Amino acid sequence: MSASTAAIRSGITEGFTGAVGHTPLIRLRALSELTGCEILGKAEFMNPGGSVKDRAALGILQEAEASGELRPGGTVVEGTAGNTGIGLAHLCNARGYRCLIVIPDTQSAEKIGLLRSLGAEVRTVPAVPYAHPDNYVKLSGRIAAETPGAVWANQFDNLANRRAHYASTGPEIWEQCERRLDAWVAATGTGGTYAGTALFLKERNERVRCVLADPHGSALHAWATTGQLVSEGSSVTEGIGNSRVTANLEGAPIDDAVRIDDQTALDTIYRLLWQEGLFMGGSVGINVAAAVETARRLGPGHRIVTVLCDGGDRYRSRLYDHEWLAGRGLSQPVRAERG
Ligand code: PMP
């Protein structure tokens, strides 16, 4: 019995770490009725740091501690779109490390402000493509190498990320579904959530269909369907999509891929708010819309699981702001009068 299982049984968890994971699997009623499938969302926004990335942050730190690379009083450095940094900042406080975060200045003010409130040292940098030497991920690696006593979390290519999902997200979903599910649908940033969970579920039942969801502006949909890493368009969603195949995504099973445009993602998160009472971030819109599309492709009677990655609070000044959306050619969905 693991420490966390013991904690669940006794009803008491051990600090922040003990509260990571064991999230509910929520039936999305209206969309399930609409499609005739059972669409289930893993409530990762309920992690103590507010996102799915708490699992990866914890897994990365635990492996770095176990290997001796991360020592008491050390520094954790990471390049992040925000959520991994938020998870790391909480964990560094709880475990006595310094936390240094490099984040593109295109990410929401809410996430950047939160990182600072948590006590992380935050460096905002211009968003430049991965090929550029000053890309935020590469820069974070250089800072870690130059800082004494520092480790680089390296969430994109450090397989501790997907191992955390293989060891927790996958088994939780499998048990919560009582070992019966037809499809697993998720967008990928690092690929850790998608790949770790897909590898676990496929091992349990090879008939579980693994579907990669992708926003516009990412090369992964084309890569999964044609083998070519090419992209077109752009997306206002944060933390998902990629121009390359990370070590975490490499070798993951992919049976199908679905690409979702921003307006559809936006319509989906507003539906979740109005119909389910769930206030969600943009990547959830991509995931849930892709789950609905997967339901259409499979036909009624299937059980489909996806991820509710983080909450809407982190995007209030963007996805929930009429003017911000209008400035990007997106229309804020209008709520119908309730009779
Ligand atoms: N949604 C959000 C909001 C995220 O921050 C991330 C992580 N970048 C993801 C989805 C994707 O998770 P992963 O890195 O495990 O692919």
Image (cartoon, rainbow, N blue to C red):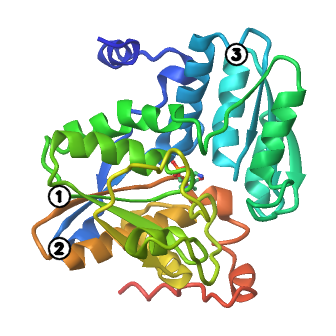
Q: Nearer the viewer, residue 291 or 279?
A: 291
Residue 219 pos. (x, y %): 55, 71
- Left/right placement of residue 214 relative to residue 132 reads left
Instruction: Give the vertical position of 21 relative to 312 (above or below).
Output: above
**What residue sits right under mark 3 in the picture?**
70
Q: Which residue is mark 1?
A: 182
- Residue 190 is situated, as x and y percent measured from the top left of the image, at 56, 50
Quote the CA–CA distance across marks 2 and 3.
46 Å
Quadrant hosting residue 110: bottom right
Left or right placement of residue 227 versus residue 305 in this view: right
Which quadrant of the figure has residue 178? top left
What is the three-letter code of the residue carrying label 2?
A: Leu
How far apart, in angstroms, are the residues tagged by discs 1 and 3? 40 Å
Which is nearer the N-term, disc 1 or disc 3?
3
Q: Indicate the amino acid at tag 3.
A: Leu
Please identify the residue farthest to the front as the structure is shown.
227
Q: CA distance from mark 1 to mark 2?
A: 9 Å
**Residue placed at 46% from the left, 78% from the top?**
260
Q: Secondary structure at mark 2?
A: helix
Query: At x 19% / y 54%, what residue is drawn?
Result: 208
Residue at the disc numbered 2: 298
Name the amino acid type tagged 1: Asp
Is the CB of mark 1 within 8 Å of ligand 1?
Answer: no
Q: Indicate the position of residue 163 as horizontal and vertical percent values.
A: 44, 33
Q: Residue at x 28, y 63 (%)?
A: 255
